[in-house]
Image (cartoon, helix red, strand yellow):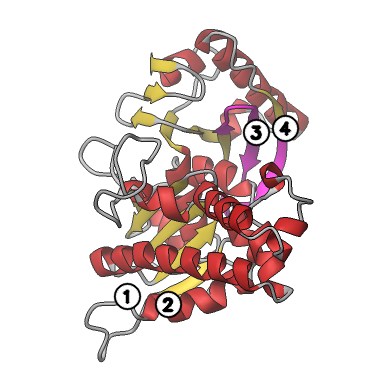
Amino acid sequence: MYYLGIDLGGTNIAIGLVDEQGHIVHQGNIPTGRERSATVILEEMALLALEVAKEAGIGLDQIHSVGVGSPGAPDVQNGVIIYNNNLGFRNVPVRAELQKHLPLPIYVDNDANCAALAEGLLGAAGGVRYSVTVTLGTGIGGGVIIDYNIYSGFNNAGAELGHMVIAAGGKLCTCGRKGCWEAYASARGLIEAAQAAAEKAPASLLFKLVDGDLSKITARTPFDAAQAGDQVAAAVVDEYLEYLAVGIGNIINIFQPEVIVLGGGVSKQGMALLTPLEEKVMGEHYGLEGVPPAKLKLAVLGNEAGIVGAALLGFAPEQRALVSLFGPERE
């Protein structure tokens, strides 16, 4: 049997046909066109899914189910997106709309949960029962995997990891609270810190790398400058890693996962991020004596995580346990 996985993004819709081992055998994508109505977007999404299957030579009778990963808050039981700010969705019946064109079981969940499921079963945490995936992008997303299943609380709104407060009364977050982890440890938080530091130190390499145009600073800029020996940038990176370690330490102390997977744009710094971060996280653990520590790993599935994770929503629990054995990082 095959499974269709749909990654519904704010700018792009990616769809993949996935086999029983979690491999994408064929895929396609279209612009989301978020200015259009939800009904039109979902219809085109369904038609693309049919086209992807047809191009792969797979009939609907060979497809077990369709999974959809979407930003926002899902009603998993009823297949509804309650709230999606990127697309302006409010109580959109995704399952009902797709089944007008795809007479198959339809599963719906948050896109970060889908990515965590993919990394937890087939990616960097493949082969373990307990993992947490943290995505370091414009914001901080995340997903918690327990016994190969997504944990999101009784109302499907849990695991908003970026919005735990790490500094009471601290920086204002986009969510309206103050001191959220996301305000400090997201790519946006890193960029804002680098811009502030560069403005105060125009002689620094951090400033010179962007020719004084602070709007050109990216999450990579302070890492590049620090690796070239710039002390201003090194201080920015070190402070960023401190904030990142505090949040990761909290996650470890609450969940004690075997693996924490780091994904998103900031994770592309690779070992320049991971090596110093591991040392800082060790100081945030509680009661480690005699207890194996969680491992930090970099995400490996990239843009495929959303598609694969969405497809995995249709896997039965015993299938998830089995497919996790195929994870590339199993040790």
- The residue range painted magenta reads 7-28
Q: Report helix, strand or loop for mark 1.
A: loop
The secondary structure making up most of the magenta span is strand
Q: CA distance from mark 3 to mark 2?
A: 37 Å
Residue ID for mark 2: 280
Q: Position of residue 301 (x, y in %)?
A: 62, 56
Disc 3 crowd, CA 10 A, few/some/many (<14, 14-19, 20+): many
| Membership of 239 in magenta stretch | no
Q: Report helix, strand or loop for mark 3.
A: strand
Asked if the residue under mark 1 is in contact with the one under mark 2, i.e. CB atoms within 8 Å, the reply is yes
Residue ID for mark 4: 28
- What's the residue type where badge 1 is placed? Glu
The numbered mark, 3 or 1, whose residue comes first in the sequence reads 3
Asked if the residue under mark 1 is in contact with the one under mark 3, i.e. CB atoms within 8 Å, the reply is no
Q: Report helix, strand or loop for mark 4.
A: strand
Quadrant where the image shows the N terminus = top right
Residue ID for mark 3: 14
Q: Position of residue 84 (x, y in %)?
A: 43, 24
Of residues 172 and 294, the one nearer the viewer is 172
Rendered position, 143 above or below 73: below
Q: Is residue 299 toward the left or the right of residue 291 in the image?
A: right
Q: Quadrant of residue 288?
A: bottom left
Look at discs 1 and 4 and give the one toward the viewer. Answer: 1
| Membership of 15 in magenta stretch | yes
Q: Position of residue 147 (x, y in %)?
A: 32, 60
Residue ID for mark 1: 284
